[in-house]
Image (spheres, helix red, strand yellow):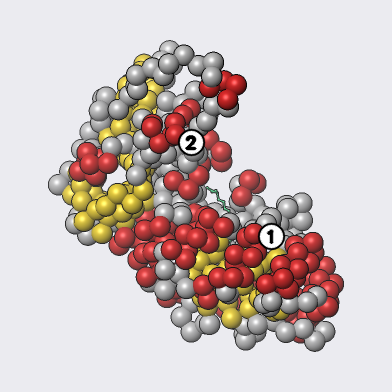
Amino acid sequence: MDHFLYRDGCLCAEDVPIERIAAAAGTPVYVYSTATLERHYRVFTAAFRGLDAQVCYAVKANGNLAVVATLAGLGAGADVVSLGELEIALAAGVPAARIVFSGVGKSEAEMAAALKAGILQINVESEPELRQLSRVATSLGVVAPAALRINPDVDALTHEKISTGRKENKFGIEWTAAHRVFGEAAQLANIRLAGIAVHIGSQLTRIEPFLAAFRRLRDLVVMLRTDGHTITTLDLGGGLGVPYGDQSLPELPSPDAYAAAVRHTVGDLGCRLILEPGRLLVANAGILVTRVLYVKEGATRTFVIVDAGMNDLLRPALYDAYHAIVPLIEPAPDGEQCEMDVVGPVCETSDTFGIGRLLPPVAAGDGLALRTAGAYGAAMASSYNARPLPAEVLVNGDRFAIVSARPSLAEMMARQRLPDWLANAMPPAPAEVGP
Ligand code: LLP
């Protein structure tokens, strides 16, 4: 359920017609809905009622400051994986005591910043990393609160590029080695290892892999406690999938079904639970709005060339991901529909948002929305083909604001430098081009 609906024939975000936003912010532009963010957060947290569970939103899904601040205002903590994300979480008002730091390759500087900020927990993924954390904590004179991310060797049954819990994946420490690592941690200075973390992948469409991973976690807790180790927190990662509008997929497990799996497996261990949903909170709370540049009749297909490209939304190119595409003007229920390939302007064949999509006839200037783009959309955008990053807008009721401005070409150019040996050989600068 989201708040992008047609009203009086026009697609709206809450109470604001998308065309108004496109006119104000230009296209391509991501549009986020506050009401949808709030709804998803509430539905997810309600499912865990009665459990000692802290939601730490995975900032990587959407690191827009206003989005993170909206979730922080609802009580969300943050799961961060870089100095940049730590900065965003703190600036968005997430209390340090609700921030966990994940990631397979944390630098010394990142560890130091996390420790200085006083965050809740650092999830360690290897023995060298554990030793490094001990050194950094010792040099700062603090004790590092740590959890061990284990690799449970469970197949998440998702796209292979976003599967993280099998033994051939780079993530975590093989679960059979947890015992050894806890023993080592007890010998290391300034480390308090009292948690286990697991994250087996993203966009999971079945509950069974979660059950298998959480059962493994449970067995480990029992074993480690028997050996005298203290385990107070379990970080269950994220991963619950969302519907992308692809009718060929089976129905997804609900947050309630996911919470039931948690209760059933690890609910009685007396541990504080940390949950790291990303996609589930933000995916359906965002759309990418684009305009048709041209309609081209190819030899065998009709191409709708839009002004958004794979640099703005990489998921279809990288994971063959499906995103529903809808016109900003509501089509008549029994109106004509044609098969079209919706493609971007980037010079790659993978710059394709949809093949053989059924859409009403479209013309240059028409607006389209790619739905379910709030997660891993803007967050993975790039400037490929020297295209500016897309703008981002947050809607709240009848208000909207640009919450990330599209960089100007001048700003993009200002990052670049010529070395002396080229600068001195340059002809005088030509007049500026473009808007
Ligand atoms: N926790 C950890 C340690 C993670 O690595 C991730 C996602 C999450 C939580 C959040 O997972 P979620 O609830 O969003 O599934 N770019 C890909 C997704 C990559 C996910 C990476 N890790 C995509 O667009 O599908």
Q: Quadrant of residue 356?
A: top left
> In which quarter of the view is residue 68 placed?
bottom left
Q: Dot 2: what SS?
A: loop
Alpha carbon separation for disc pair 2 and 1: 27 Å
Q: Which residue is mark 1?
A: 108
Q: Which mark is residue 415?
A: 2
Quarter occupied by the N terminus: bottom left
- In screen coordinates, is 412 left or right of 320? left
Q: Amino acid at mark 2?
A: Arg
Question: Mark on residue 142?
Answer: none
Name the N-terminal-most of marks 2 and 1. 1
At which x and y percent is residue 108? 69, 60
Q: Quadrant of ligand 1?
A: bottom right
**Left or right relative to 402: residue 420:** right
Q: Is residue 322 visible?
A: no
Q: Residue at x 36, y 48 (%)?
A: 404
Give the residue type at disc 1.
Glu
